[in-house]
């Protein structure tokens, strides 16, 4: 079962929104490796002011 992580996205960040959609789609397909990749990319994505 995929591990739930706290939502770290910023609602107005298009890249984070896209990665979140890709993460969900990957989980639905059973591609857990891609889902984890998306989570890592979201957590490493810089935001102004350091907010995530």
Image (spheres, grey):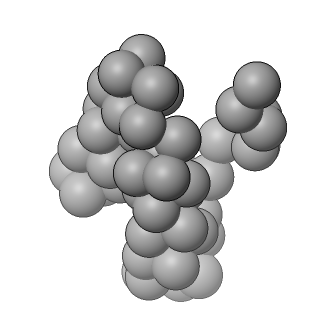
Q: Residue at x 76, y 25 (%)?
A: 1
Q: How many marks?
A: 0
Residue 49 on image: x %, y %: 53, 82
Q: Residue at x 46, y 62 (%)?
A: 37
Q: Is residue 16 above or below residue 45?
A: above
Q: Left or right: where does residue 39 sit relative to residue 22?
A: right
Q: Is residue 36 visible?
A: yes
Q: Is residue 9 above or below residue 51?
A: above
**Quadrant including the C terminus:** bottom right
Residue 50 on image: x %, y %: 59, 81
Q: Is residue 12 above or below residue 50?
A: above
Q: Is residue 12 visible?
A: no
Q: Nearer the viewer, residue 23 or 34?
A: 34
Residue 5 on image: x %, y %: 75, 43
| Residue at the top extreme of this rendering | 28
Q: Residue at x 40, y 51 (%)?
A: 34
């Amino acid at each position: 079962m995929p591990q739930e992580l706290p939502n770290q996205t910023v609602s107005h960040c298009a890249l984070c929104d896209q990665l979140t959609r890709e993460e969900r789609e990957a989980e639905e397909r059973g591609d857990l490796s891609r889902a984890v990749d998306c989570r890592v990319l979201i957590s490493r994505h810089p935001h102004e002011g350091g907010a995530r």
